[in-house]
Image: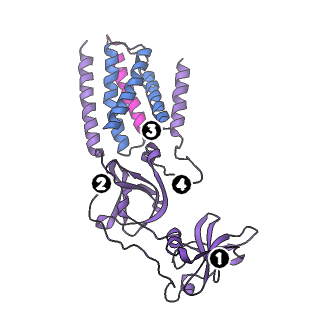
Amino acid sequence: MKKRLLALALALLVMAALPLSARADVIFTPDDDFYEDHYDEMDYVNSGYIANGPGGALTLYESPENSMVKGTAENGEGVYVSVRYTDDDGVAWAQIELFERALNGWVPMDYLVKVYNSDDFREEFADRVAAEEGSLAASEQPVYFWSYPGSDVFQADLPLEGDYLPEYWEVFVDDAGRKWAHVGYYMGIRNAWVCLDAPTADYAALYADHAPQQVTKPEITEPTAEIKPGGISPVVAIGAAAAVAAVSAAILVVMKKRK
Amino acid sequence: MERFVISLALTLALELPMAYAWGLRGRALAMAALTNLMTNPLAVALHLAGVPQIPIEVGVVLTEAAVYRTFSRTPGWRVPKPVLLAAVSNALSWGLGLIIQL
């Protein structure tokens, strides 16, 4: 009997040590207790944002219900938002990742500014994006995969070799007359644009003065209102729990003394 | 607050019948309930504050084992195999918690 119980206890210990975050192997899922507990209430976001908190920085909290501070990000720092959660007061919270610093946490969605990306570009220039199929030519020189035509951000620059070359189904012609191809997916690169007329040209080579077409980026104004997670502060919770423990211990001492 | 109440209720619902099956009766069961009241809310609060679960659980088992052992050595109290009782009952309630989370 004892051996069976010990075996059960050991099995449970091993189960508990296993990581629980691998819900899917296709999309990123955060390794986060609050996410696990509220999995059904999460909205998938999967997008880049810029930190824009009050007082020049973004405070990362343990969860929308736990005000323990995990770290900060300076305004202007790029963050990745995996999921969004809306609390009972209607406040939207974002689970953010700062991969370079191995830091993650929860911040109010209002303290984030969306990074203008390929989807925004396609929406803004929908009337100039045309259907056209093709595949990129092989290149020994690195080919730039830009966030969108005119962006100074590229996802990757790599030579194109072998039988499997990037395919595209949409093109865009910029104001300088250069044709751009939209690549949906290639070797982990998603939703990127390649300049078909100058695929290996960097930003300086593409735009001597400035990008030929201007995109509409939101104006960033620093928020003033302070939004904090609801629930009990961890310090207060620990204090209250310690008081309960102390009272329980005192009663136990009394019980032990009474024979 | 809700998390504290649910956690304590589930722990007591599992560990008290476990203690009864272990042979604890009457005031010994009350002692086991008080021991859980001493450790469970503090464990939940520490976890909410970001302390990893395994060290917390180890601390809970050691604390409860120490209390049970103290009472087992006191005349008039019957708490058989106190350390094993603490280890098994906490492993069961922890396991139940994991299953609920999944």
- Please tell me whether residue A149 belongs to the stretch shown in magenta: no
Q: Which mark is residue B54?
A: 3
Farthest residue, direction top: B76
Which chain is displayed in purple in the rendered image?
A: A
Q: Which residue is mark 4?
A: A28
Which region of the structure is painted magenta?
B53-80
Q: CA distance from mark 1 to mark 3?
A: 48 Å
Q: CA distance from mark 2 to mark 3?
A: 28 Å
Amino acid under disc 3: Ile
Q: Which residue is mark 1?
A: A142
Chain of residue at mark 1? A
- Please tell me whether residue B66 belongs to the stretch shown in magenta: yes
Please state which of the two labelled residues, at mark 2 or mark 1, is closer to the viewer.
2
Please state which of the two labelled residues, at mark 4 or mark 1, is closer to the viewer.
4
Farthest residue, direction bottom: A209
Determine the colour of chain B.
Answer: blue
Same chain check for tags 4 and 1: yes
Q: Which residue is mark 2?
A: A228
**Above or below, comparing residue A122 to residue A236 in the picture:** below
**Nearest to the observer: residue A169 or residue A234:** A169
C-beta proximity under 8 Å, tags 1 and 3 = no
SS class of the residue under badge 4?
Answer: loop
Circle 4 crowding by C-alpha within 10 Å: few under 14, some 14–19, many from 20: some
* Residue B60, horizontal then vertical, whole percent: 38, 32
